[in-house]
Image: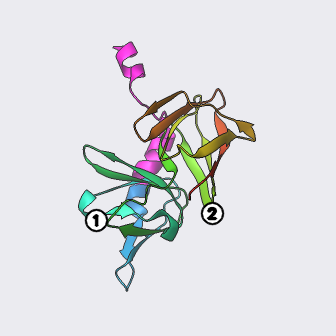
């Protein structure tokens, strides 16, 4: 049973962290802007994932702030928040930009500036994360080049022995 459980993707948290995340769900404010084009998320210091119905569209990463990426799962589209306050724009079509698709860590921050995408992760176990659409990117962690562990379609998987790192992607987008 333990082998099966450990073979599953996990994001370990202490019970005290889980309580803060669960309680934060009650305090998060989600509002649509007056123009109807964006959503504002406020008061999310512990909550770092929102589940959206797929019918709403995909996150428009360049037009959004505080969004590290997203992934689709059986229950919906999971948007990864990288800040306490987020502005989320949605689009009908995925622009297929490099982004964080999955991680076993807390996302502390994420910034995008042209061909440079940077995000910071912290975990209680060695870091594991997956990037989407990163085929034309060089990836580094704390200034050291990273080699992919495996590729699975549009996902590239990485593993570090460190429990925290700043990840940088330098991508050729043209």
Residue 46's tag is none
Choose the circle earlier in sequence order: 1 or 2.
1
Residue 114's tag is 2
x, y percent for residue 46: 50, 53
* Residue furthest right as drawn: 143
Answer whether labels 1 and 2 touch (C-beta < 8 Å): no
Work out how far the residue at label 1 is from the one at label 2, CA to CA, in angstroms. 26 Å
Question: Which residues fall within the magenta stretch?
Answer: 1-23
x, y percent for residue 123: 58, 37
Q: Main secondary structure of the magenta part?
A: helix
Residue 131 sits inside the magenta stretch: no
How many marks do you count on the picture?
2
Q: Examine the rendering and report whether any part of residue 13 can be seen.
A: no
**Callout 1: helix, strand or loop?**
helix
* In the depicted structure, whether residue 85 falls above or below residue 164: below
Which residue shows up at 65% across the image and 38% down it? Answer: 164
Q: Is residue 127 left or right of residue 96?
A: right
Callout 2 environment at 10 Å: few (<14), some (14 to 19), or many (20+)? few
Quarter-of-image position of residue 28:
bottom left
Q: Is residue 92 left or right of residue 68?
A: left
Callout 1 environment at 10 Å: few (<14), some (14 to 19), or many (20+)? few
Front: mark 1 or 2: 2
Quarter-of-image position of residue 24:
bottom left
Which residue shows up at 37% across the image and 74% down it? Answer: 31
Q: Which residue is mark 1?
A: 56
**Callout 2: helix, strand or loop?**
loop
Q: Is residue 77 left or right of residue 105?
A: left
Which one is in front, 160 or 41?
Answer: 160
Q: Examine the rendering and report whether any part of residue 140 can be seen.
A: yes
The quadrant the N terminus occupies is top left
């Amino acid at each position: 049973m333990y082998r099966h459980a450990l073979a599953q993707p996990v994001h370990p948290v202490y019970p005290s962290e889980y309580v803060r995340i669960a309680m934060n769900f009650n305090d998060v404010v989600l509002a649509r802007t007056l123009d109807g084009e964006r959503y504002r998320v406020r008061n999310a210091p512990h909550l770092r994932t929102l589940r959206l119905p797929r019918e709403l569209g995909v996150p428009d990463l360049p037009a959004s702030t505080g969004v590290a990426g997203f992934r689709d799962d059986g229950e919906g589209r999971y948007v990864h928040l990288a800040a306490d306050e987020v502005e989320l724009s949605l689009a009908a079509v995925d622009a297929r930009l490099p982004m964080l698709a999955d991680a076993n860590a807390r996302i502390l921050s994420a910034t995008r500036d042209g061909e440079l995408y940077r995000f910071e992760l912290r975990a209680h176990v060695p870091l594991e994360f997956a990037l989407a659409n990163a085929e034309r990117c060089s990836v580094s962690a704390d200034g050291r080049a990273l080699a992919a562990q495996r590729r699975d379609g549009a996902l590239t998987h990485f593993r570090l022995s460190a429990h925290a790192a700043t990840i940088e992607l330098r991508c050729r987008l043209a």
